[in-house]
Amino acid sequence: MVLVKKQRSNCSSNELHVLAVDDSFVDRKVVERLLKISSCKVTVVESGRSALQFLGLDGETSCVGFDELKVNLIMTDYSMPGMTGYELLKKIKGSSKLREIPVVVMSSENIMTRIDSCIEEGAEEFLVKPLKLSDVERLKDFILKGDDKNRKNNNSNSLSRKRKSQDDLVLPMPMATLCSARNHDFPSQPKSMLDQPLQKQPRLVQTD
């Protein structure tokens, strides 16, 4: 059975959609509450398999239309039956479509080998439970700054492409054409009046 619970609200420019994955009912409630306090839109699922189905990575079409519902951050517990948070992380980072989504792994056990493995696999951060509001707020600020930077880069790239397209409209004269023009015998220009030789004017003879 797939448990998917969404907290819907009106979208705004500073609102994040977070997918929270945890097999513990209590921990799901804790992370959901903290995310709501931070004005985030929340989707909670109970397992890694449910998360894959939500994201459309299980070979089937996403049950909630993922293409229309952008996910800004994925927070997953490490120790879950069936599929661990580490395995879910590898699935997400192995997807060309979803690898850019930041993934945060959570665990009640502070085991360095697990932390190192998750960070090396591409996790944005590894948080030790219990999760605190300051953790969520810090993650939210980090993701929002990243989105603003990406938007600025996209706008800059778009402007650069536009300028390049305009520059391409003015084509330089090919070198062969330029050389041909220089070697061509053009008709000589008429000399100025100052360069013309003076001609004698007929003398008027006055008769009686």
Image: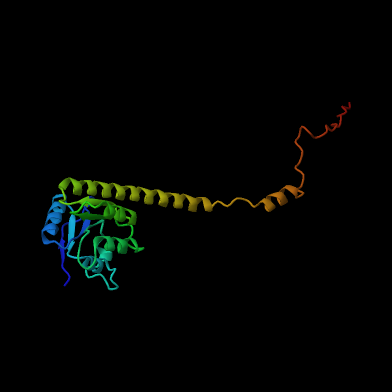
Question: Which quadrant holds the N terminus?
Answer: bottom left
Residue 158's spot in the image, x, y percent?
Answer: 41, 52
| Vertical order, 167 against 26 (above or below) | above
> For residue 113, what is the image quadrant?
bottom left
Q: Front-most of 198 and 32?
A: 32
Does residue 102 show up?
no
Q: Quadrant of residue 75?
A: bottom left
Residue for point 20% across, 63% down: 80
Residue 41, horizontal then vertical, whole percent: 18, 56
Location of residue 56 with respect to 199 vertically, above or below: below
The picture places residue 99, in percent across and down from the top left corner, at: 33, 59
Residue shown at 15% from the left, 47% from the top = 133
Q: In the depicted view, which residue is nearer to us: 150 or 45?
A: 45
> Image check: 149 left or right of 188?
left
Left/right of residue 118 with respect to residue 25 in the rendered view: right
Q: Visible in this render: residue 155?
A: yes
- Comparing 151 with 95, the one in front is 95
The foreground one among 168 and 207 is: 168
Could you tell whether 175 is left or right of 124 in the image? Answer: right
The quarter of the image holding the C terminus is top right
Query: Which residue appears at 77% of the width and 38% of the height?
Result: 191
